[in-house]
Amino acid sequence: MNQHPDTSADDQNHVAVPVRFGCVGLGGYAGASCEFLERCEGDSSIAGAIRLTAVCEPDQRRHAGAIKRLRGRGVRVVEKYEDLLNEPVEAIWLPLPIDLHRPYTIQALEAAKGVLCEKPAAGSVDDVDAMIAARDRLQQPVLIGYQHMYHPATAQIKRLLLDGAIGSIRSASVCACWPRSTDYFSRNDWVGRYQRDGAWVMDSPANNALAHYLNLSLFLLGESVSDSAALSDVEAELYRANAIETNDTAALRITTQRGIPLLALLTHACGESLGPIIRVDGTEGSLTLVPDGQTTMTTRRSSQNWPAYGDCRSHMISSMRQLIREGKTTNTTATLETSRAQTVVINAASQVAPVHKIPQSMVRQVAVDNQQVRAVRGIESLFEQCVSSGKLPHESGQVDWSVPAKKLSIRDYQHFTGPCRVPSAS
């Protein structure tokens, strides 16, 4: 009888070889990402070893201290992205502005590198689809930085929902009020803008800081353990209290092709923090998911709790490592496909609904953590009432500054035509 050679030792050695990571940037979140990769080198929770091998930073004078420290640890630091792509790295983390996601991802794929791209996937569905096509053509993995997607609790909760733990899902909501200061809205040249240098940015709460929770909500409503919800239509009310181009407040009703409504209420124009809270209601129970607190699934017979998610980046890095070394991962992941649903919602809402300016009489200046915030009066209680009733702000009849929602079918949404502009008389 023929004997097959024992390859288990070779496989184990292959898995043990550190995956070589590169990272783009040393400022802001990019700098924090590099530091996190350094800490991951000794993290026993990662499914195997990783190593920060190279970093790209164009402004070497500004970050001279960090560069000296990195080079002292044996990390290559280069000025140009093209030089980073020539380094012997296997995966590249892209903590970049939204408009750069598509070109930088495709360049990395063409250089035979796996990609971990910051959320959201891109500024337009056209860009996401181009990234999917490049990934499939070049056969390299791409993951998106929706960190909560990688946590083991997400997979467990999703399976329970699919198994009917709360019965048939009837409705869902995601609500978040996160105050952001006037300084936040002037921190760079793309904040609150539709485009930069001709590329879509679509910066807003729902497409930046709070995109995590809209994306997670859409994923939980998907019909399989690895899919986000298939969508039917979106109704949108978009507002701004700050001096920006896009919205700082979004009220959306997204309906899935199974007829499940998801109410999304997201704002930065608030004086108090609320949530994020994701709620899914079924015929036999409910799920209340609070990533920063306790998550509870309650049925007629029992109740199950999960602790706060905490920092999920180690799960994300672990998934990227597994894809590079083993071609598969044991966690749920934020793929380009699952992330696409969030981009479709952002594009469709902007395409159908103009951004209306909230009257100055309804906006107050408040101090939050010693910073000035433009807050809409009573928006926190308005959102709570809307979640309770399942209504959009205009439907609630609670505020006279609201406008009727605009609706668009998104069953086969493949192209973003651009934002709807508010009538000049508004």
Image (cartoon, rainbow, N blue to C red):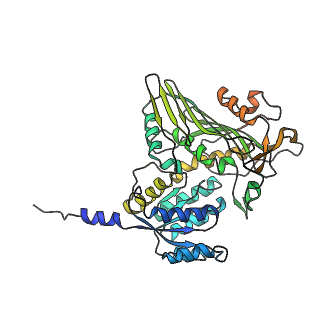
Q: Position of residue 71 (x, y in %)?
A: 53, 77
Q: Would residue 304 appear left or right of 93 to someone viewing this image? A: left
Residue 188 found in image quarter? bottom right
Residue 29 found in image quarter? bottom right
Q: Would residue 217 appear left or right of 41 to someone viewing this image? A: right
Q: Position of residue 190 (x, y in %)?
A: 73, 59
Q: Would residue 424 appear left or right of 386 to someone viewing this image? A: right
Would residue 193 be seen by someone viewing this image from the given angle? no
Q: Write the residue at 73% across / 55% down.
A: 184
The C terminus - image quarter: top right
Q: Position of residue 15 (x, y in %)?
A: 34, 63
| Vertical placement of residue 416 versus 379, above or below | below
Would residue 249 be seen by someone viewing this image from the given angle? yes
| Vertical placement of residue 4 versus 300, above or below | below
- In this view, the residue in front, 135 or 19, is 19
Q: Where is residue 16 in the image (x, y as percent from the top left)?
A: 34, 65
- In this view, the residue in front, 230 or 245, is 245
Count of residue discs = 0
Q: Write the residue at 64% across / 47% down.
A: 210
| Vertical placement of residue 85 versus 359, above or below | below
